[in-house]
Image (cartoon, helix red, strand yellow):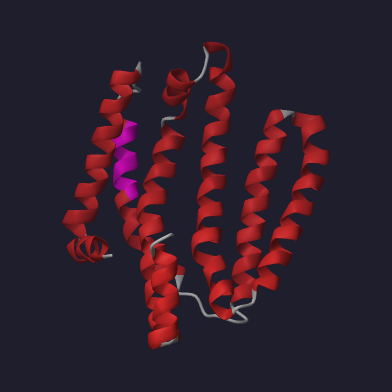
Amino acid sequence: NRAAYPLTVRALEQEGPEAARERLHDTLLLLLCIGLPAAAGLTLLAGPVAQVVVAPEFTGTAAAVIPLITVAALLAGLKAYFVDIGFQLHGDTRQQAWVMLSAAGLNVLLNIVLIPRVGLMGAVWSTVAVYAVALLLSVMLVRRSFRLPALRPVLLRPVLATAGMVLLLIVLPQPAGITDLLLVIGAAALAYALLLGLQFPTLVRRLLRM
């Protein structure tokens, strides 16, 4: 984002809204190409990752929390580094502030309702729900001032490559220990890169030029 945002602003100032949208398209593409496989991998490997990074008595809880926090992080990244840039390009950050305030209020409300009932998982589910609502509200509001690139055409390619990586992770045995985990992660990353590169060479060349 530190590189993408200044490039998008410069494109808007020097070439106009269409050039800025093209830059945002590239930003979204890169976010999805990194975020989708990372989220899918962490979700499928939540148990082994938890066994490596936390004490045994917390493994079960961590394994349940990791997939949800991963989804929340992906939603938060799409909002902050893609949708919110539309507010900033148009100079309408008040709408962005209203979304943040609404999300904070919803988070407090959901925590009050859910935590007494389901404990820690209530806070986690609240976080996922809040980021999902904030992303949806931001998309709805930003369209009034700045037209964002369409999500669907950009989404297809990384989704297909991620699906292939997921199939590999399902077939591979669950890793036991940090060495096995690193080998599985390496194999999954290589499979994803090959699928993205072999099936969509123009996409990879475009990413390398960014």
Q: Position of residue 158 (x, y in %)?
A: 34, 56
Label the magenta part by its dominant secondary structure: helix
Q: Position of residue 25 (x, y in %)?
A: 39, 70
Residue at the limit of the structure toward the top, as seen here: 56
Q: How many marks?
A: 0
Q: Is residue 169 magenta?
A: yes
> Between residues 164 and 136, which one lies in front from this camera angle?
136
Q: Position of residue 195 (x, y in %)?
A: 22, 50
What residue is shown at x 46% (from left), y 22% (from top)?
53
What residue is shown at x 49% (from left), y 61% (from top)?
81
Q: Is residue 55 magenta?
A: no
- The magenta region covers 162-170
What residue is shown at x 74% (from left), y 48% (from top)?
107
User: To which quarter of the image does residue 58 belong?
Assistant: top right
What residue is shown at x 48% (from left), y 23% (from top)?
50
Image vertical order of residue 173 relative to residue 66, above or below: above
User: To which quarter of the image does residue 141 belong?
Assistant: bottom right
Image vertical order of residue 128 relative to residue 152, above or below: above
Quarter of the image for the N terminus: give it.
bottom left
Image vertical order of residue 207 relative to residue 43, above or below: below
